[in-house]
């Protein structure tokens, strides 16, 4: 059996050849502990330094503003908890949106059990949080605002620049979870107006288990992982040298091919979407009308339960906007936050393309998806 | 120039060929997201499942008691904070020793800023914490005791079994940081009497950036990294599939070769130590008289400042028991906790062998170290 067409790039990406090469070299050759003051340690330290410069360059940051982490979840947790605790004397109020990733949302929920309060600003029907409502939710005791760049489900781009400009002017720290947008869109930290920004290696053709947290100089930060003083005391734990090398290589690759990568993904995503619309005219594209990640098609096929559709879809690997709870398909939290009716929400698939997706892939995938939707609709009758 | 002889296995180990193979295969073939419900995800999930069974088997645990983390530091932080917070209603007192790894000690220090109190039980001159003093430090409001297995500097083995038997009988949760002993000594969780146990991949010929936390069933645990519900809700973050595969392979290798690995390391370590003693008769072996990790020789060369010695030691890569602060060599916290005089402490090297160290390596290394010590002693005159 040939491999299914992969349309789940927002879940994870295959490792780029450049990243694999960097990892393989580091695993064989730079296995020392970067903290060791001898030849083996120096070699590992040099690999980490190179990668730090590569990540910084993609983000338009300085190398000493990049802290390596175990991934997007740790970066988000560290940003939220590390800033909130650093500024707890000044205030204990945070502002996020209702569509943040669980790594942001549940870090905030944890702080709520520790005497902090959190305002979750609702999104509109396109899945976009209005900048003025975020800005209006800030109070005198607000210390941190965290708004993602591109949503992982809808792909909807949030008004990060405007929010950053307004809240940073009021002395509030601004964090942005850019796990889904780094490597898909320009994500320069000065352009986005952020104090902190989350990067996840495996969303941009780098390895799993590694990420970065951009921390602008002079940002109050109390730390998160604690131990021996790695990463200038900001993040303890022996550096994951090989994965860091892979992340660095993935960032360099992203920087080099970003304009054409973005254009390519947008072309195949748009082609997929129009193919699907031709086959299923009542298709509902979530986030339509909003600026979206160039690779994301999040769409409902009314009358075709998503999990039922997936059960008939052998040749395409893709995600759904619904999960099975007690035998019933329930729409995702993001779809509910967008006030998508349940009957539509539970028929939603998340189809996400990548740098390796060809026009032929999406043509074939659209045929297979349309056929599976047809079967699922019949099953529902 | 030929490569220096590596005598710094407690800092980190090279990746075993078996672990590298497992990682390479996973990076190429199992790059899906284990949470994805399609062929790519299932393949990745299967790799994680296999590794979980391998780790569990080495520890004599059940697979569902193993949680993968980003390494020893995260495992320690999660154990300390995750248990203390889960039991905060019952009590807010913790007991550790004065020679715990910073990942334990500073997690406790963090909790001290959050209304917890911590008793740090002193060690004896061998670097061993007396079991009865740990047990005696427990109070009615003690919820957690954390004592390491083998100390990372001295190699001294702590009386984990006795402490576990006594405190667990009193309803106190017992965590053991076994980062340095897993793969060097038997570390079965029932034998060690622990509720939680920390494993660090890169200390046992597995990759950096991955570890495990053994959590015995029914142990109260509030979690640490928060986000999407990976690892049965106990640790969020997309699984680091390739590194997990590498850790699993390293654990299987350790299980297979543990008796001969332990014997081999003990032989070359003892040979190194007697070579050194012959050349430098006033050598002081820290932890002498205690049961020690079979690979660790932590020894002072009185009159030869450690950093001075290392500066003359080209052909051997090893660590020191002193660090440079404001231009002066200061003995490590562990040496100070053992009440080693400063003049001795600052002359300490940490020489740690591994499965790849040969008798010829340690013979040559002892010659080079003795020569460097001689040069350092002359420099001090």
Image (spheres, coloured by chain):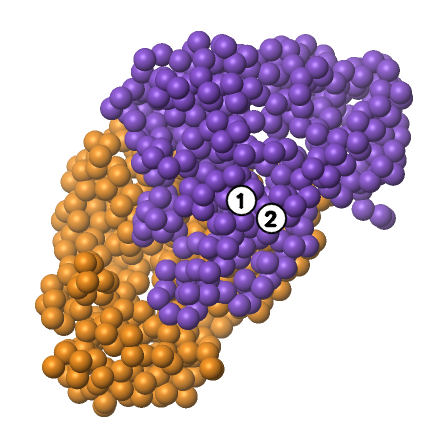
Chain colours: A purple, B orange
What quarter of the picture does the C terminus of chain B occupy? bottom left
Mark number for residue B222?
none
Circles 1 and 2 in contact, beta carbons < 8 Å? yes
Mark number for residue A57?
1
Q: Earlier in the sequence, mark 1 or mark 2?
A: 1
Measured from the top left, where is residue A33 in percent x and y?
41, 62
Q: Secondary structure at mark 2?
A: helix
Measured from the top left, where is residue A374 in percent x and y?
87, 22
Mark number for residue A252?
2
- Tell me if residue B62 can be seen: no
Q: Left or right: where does residue B82 sit relative to residue A4?
A: left
Task: Return the residue found at the far bottom.
Answer: B278
Frontmost residue, B119 versus A236: A236
Which residue is at 36% across, 12% downward? A139
Frontmost residue, B281 versus B183: B281
Q: Chain of mark 2?
A: A
Which residue is at 54% across, 34% downward? A188
Which residue is at 12% across, 67% downward? B342
Q: Left or right: where does residue A262 sit relative to residue A271?
A: left
Discs 1, 2: same chain: yes
Q: Secondary structure at mark 1?
A: helix
Frontmost residue, B119 versus A139: A139
Measured from the top left, where is residue A342 in percent x and y?
67, 12
| Relative vertical location of residue B286 with respect to residue A88 in this rendering, above or below | below
Using the rendered view, name the quadrant where residue B151 is placed. Answer: bottom left
């Amino acid at each position: 059996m040939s491999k299914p067409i992969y349309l789940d790039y927002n879940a994870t990406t295959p490792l780029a050849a450049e990243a694999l090469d960097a990892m393989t070299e580091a695993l064989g050759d730079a296995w020392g502990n970067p903290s060791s003051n001898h030849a083996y340690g120096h070699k590992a330290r040099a690999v980490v330094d190179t990668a730090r410069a590569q990540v910084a360059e993609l983000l338009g940051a300085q190398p000493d503003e990049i802290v390596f982490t175990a991934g997007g979840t740790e970066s988000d947790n560290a940003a939220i908890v590390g800033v909130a605790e650093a500024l707890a004397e000044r205030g204990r109020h945070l502002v996020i949106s209702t569509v943040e990733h669980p790594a942001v949302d549940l870090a905030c929920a944890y702080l709520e059990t520790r005497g902090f309060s959190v305002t979750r600003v609702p999104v509109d029907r396109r899945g976009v949080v209005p900048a003025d409502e975020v800005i209006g939710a800030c109070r005198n005791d607000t210390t941190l605002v965290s708004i993602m760049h591109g949503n992982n489900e809808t792909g909807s781009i949030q008004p990060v620049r405007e929010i950053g400009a307004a809240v940073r002017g009021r002395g509030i720290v601004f964090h942005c979870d850019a796990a889904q947008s780094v490597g898909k869109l320009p994500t320069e930290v000065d352009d986005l107006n952020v104090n902190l920004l989350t990067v996840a290696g495996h969303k941009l053709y780098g390895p799993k288990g590694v990420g970065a947290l951009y921390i602008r100089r002079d940002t109050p930060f109390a730390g998160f992982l604690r131990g021996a003083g790695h990463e200038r005391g900001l993040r303890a734990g022996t550096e994951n040298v090989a994965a860091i090398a892979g992340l660095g290589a993935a960032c360099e690759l992203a920087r080099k091919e970003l304009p054409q990568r973005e254009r390519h993904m947008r072309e195949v995503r748009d082609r997929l979407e129009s193919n699907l619309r031709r086959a299923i005219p009542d298709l509902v594209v979530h986030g339509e009308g909003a600026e979206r990640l160039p690779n994301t098609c999040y769409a409902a096929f009314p009358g075709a339960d998503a999990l039922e559709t997936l059960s008939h879809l052998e040749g395409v690997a893709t995600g759904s906007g619904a999960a099975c709870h007690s035998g019933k398909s329930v729409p995702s939290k993001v779809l509910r936050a967008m006030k998508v009716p349940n009957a539509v929400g539970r028929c939603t698939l998340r189809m996400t393309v990548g740098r390796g997706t060809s026009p032929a892939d999406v043509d074939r995938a659209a045929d297979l998806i349309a056929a599976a939707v047809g079967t699922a609709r019949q099953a529902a009758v």
